[in-house]
């Protein structure tokens, strides 16, 4: 039975024709570079803007071979998969992270070998960038203010995946950086604490900037537009619960324990240039 959720859905256009590779064990693999244009709305002013994000999508085996055969630069595709972050150290010994999408499903949306041009700002055209997570909070939320007075916060969520491998049951934990703005940021900071189980929905994006020393830095994050506290007794749930013992209520309100987790991006969240 699944105990967390790590799901992403994208509809976008291929920025270059993918190149098929073979691993040393003979498996086919390819990286799909995807551009997604989607609508984004902040909570306070409800003004909608068109935002562009870029994603690396990894496909394996038969999916990789089909993509290599049929997709062209500009092709539109649907991708469903999960987020995964690679970590390594550069030649200076500094930790680097790169988030990518591991595809579970792909649907090619263009007619065979045909790429349609669509209006840039039509209500009926565009892309989809939606991430859904169920996981545990890895740290308390610190609410901050931008120079313009807008509320913003960032926090970490851990999700787990378990599968049956050759060596038995294996488990992998992913750590996701979440950013919330305006009303959602304020409400999240007031109600959600480290260790609690939450549901997050939003858009996945990677952005870059230069440090004062002139070095380029990247961070991947989920811009949340929905955050829900899970597994806790709310006033509404209590009103429908009927005769619930104090022991049951206490057990329902307890947050699951999580290990101490230090989310490390290329820069501290407090230093991000919001």
Image (spheres, rainbow, N blue to C red):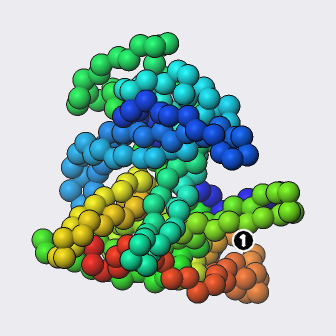
The residue to which callout 1 is attached is 242
| Quarter assignment of residue 264 | bottom left
Say whether residue 85 is left or right of residue 96.
right
Q: Is residue 116 visible?
A: yes
Residue 218's place in the image compared with 103, above or below, is below
Residue 49's place in the image compared with 83, above or below, is above
Q: Secondary structure at mark 1?
A: loop
Say how many tags the image has. 1
* Residue drawn where x is 85% and y is 57% of the image: 166
* Residue drawn where x is 44% and y is 35% of the image: 11
Q: Is residue 146 visible?
A: no
Say whether residue 18 is left or right of residue 239.
left
Q: Residue furthest left?
A: 148
Say whether residue 235 is left or right of residue 24.
left
Q: Position of residue 163 (x, y in %)?
A: 78, 57
Q: Nearer the viewer, residue 73 or 108?
A: 73
Say whether residue 147 is left or right of residue 52.
left
Q: Position of residue 139 (x, y in %)?
A: 49, 82
Q: Position of residue 217 (x, y in %)?
A: 30, 67
Label 1 environment density (alpha carbons within 10 Å; few <14, some 14–19, many ≥20)? few
* Residue drawn where x is 21% and y is 49% of the image: 47
**Quadrant where the C terminus lies?**
bottom left
* Residue drawn where x is 30% and y is 48% of the image: 40
């Amino acid at each position: 039975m699944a105990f967390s959720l790590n799901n992403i859905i994208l509809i976008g256009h291929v920025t270059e024709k993918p190149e098929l590779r073979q691993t040393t064990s003979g498996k086919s693999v390819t990286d799909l570079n995807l551009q997604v244009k989607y609508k984004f709305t902040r909570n306070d002013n409800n003004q909608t803007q068109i935002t562009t994000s870029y994603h690396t999508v990894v496909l394996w085996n038969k999916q990789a071979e089909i993509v290599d055969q049929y997709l062209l630069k500009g092709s539109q595709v649907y991708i469903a998969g999960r987020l995964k972050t690679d970590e390594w150290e550069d030649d200076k010994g500094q930790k680097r992270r790169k988030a990518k999408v591991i595809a579970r499903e792909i649907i090619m949306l263009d007619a065979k070998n045909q790429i349609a041009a669509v209006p840039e700002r039509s209500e009926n055209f565009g892309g989809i960038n939606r991430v859904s997570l169920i996981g545990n909070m890895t740290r308390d939320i610190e609410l901050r203010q931008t120079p313009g007075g807008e509320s913003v916060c960032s926090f970490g969520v851990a999700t787990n995946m378990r599968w049956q491998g050759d060596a038995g049951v294996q488990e992998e934990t992913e750590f996701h950086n979440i950013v919330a703005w305006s009303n959602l940021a304020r409400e999240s900071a007031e109600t959600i604490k480290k260790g609690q189980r939450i549901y997050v929905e939003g858009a996945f994006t990677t952005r870059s900037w230069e440090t004062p020393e002139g070095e380029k830095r990247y961070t991947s994050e989920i811009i949340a537009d929905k955050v829900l506290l899970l597994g806790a007794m709310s006033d509404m749930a209590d009103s429908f619960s009927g005769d619930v013992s104090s022991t049951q209520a206490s057990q329902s309100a307890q947050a699951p324990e999580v290990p101490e987790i230090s989310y490390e991006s290329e820069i501290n969240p407090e230093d991000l240039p919001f």
